[in-house]
Amino acid sequence: MLKSYSYNFGDIENDFTKAKVVILPIPYEATTCYGKGTEKGPTAILTASRYITEFDIELQKNIDELGFFVLEELKLSKISPQEAV
């Protein structure tokens, strides 16, 4: 069974069997030389997702109908960029 992250996308149920969108958070910051903080990006995006409009104009549907699943974050912070790729 897949392990999910501690955050959901928006207020949408985190159910892999219903998900059409799977998100893999990768908080990687090994190559940042100006302004640290990129490792906090995945959490910031998922936190902000709670405040987005549910209706998508391009898809003409509510995004909660798509189903989202957020995987457990990938831990890469202690490895080189070559190893990460």
Image (cartoon, helix red, strand yellow):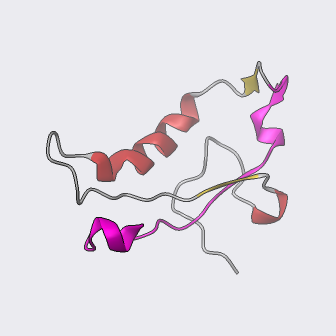
Up-down relation of residue 47 to residue 3 (above or below) = above
The residue nearer to you, when weighing 28 against 85, is 85
* Residue 83 visible from this viewpoint: yes
- Is 15 part of what is drawn in magenta? no
- Left or right of residue 52: residue 62: right
Answer with the quarter of the image where residue 53 lies. Answer: top right
- Left or right of residue 72: residue 63: right
Residue at 47% across / 41% down in the picture? 45
Instruction: Quadrant for the N terminus, please.
Output: bottom right
Q: Position of residue 7 (x, y in %)?
A: 53, 54
Instruction: Quadrant for the C terminus, please.
Output: bottom left
- Is 62 part of what is drawn in magenta? yes
Residue at 75% across / 24% down in the picture? 56
Up-down relation of residue 50 to residue 30 (above or below) = above
Residue at 30% across / 47% down in the picture? 38
- Left or right of residue 43: residue 69: right
Residue at 35% across / 74% down in the picture? 83
Up-down relation of residue 18 to residue 38 (above or below) = below
Up-down relation of residue 4 to residue 18 (above or below) = below
Residue most extreme to the bottom: 1
Q: Position of residue 58 (x, y in %)?
A: 77, 21
Residue most extreme to the top: 57
Say how many tags the image has.
Answer: 0
Residue most extreme to the front: 82
Specify the segment rendered in magenta: 59-85
Q: Position of residue 55 (x, y in %)?
A: 76, 24
Q: Position of residue 13 (x, y in %)?
A: 72, 52
The residue nearer to you, when weighing 74 against 15, is 74
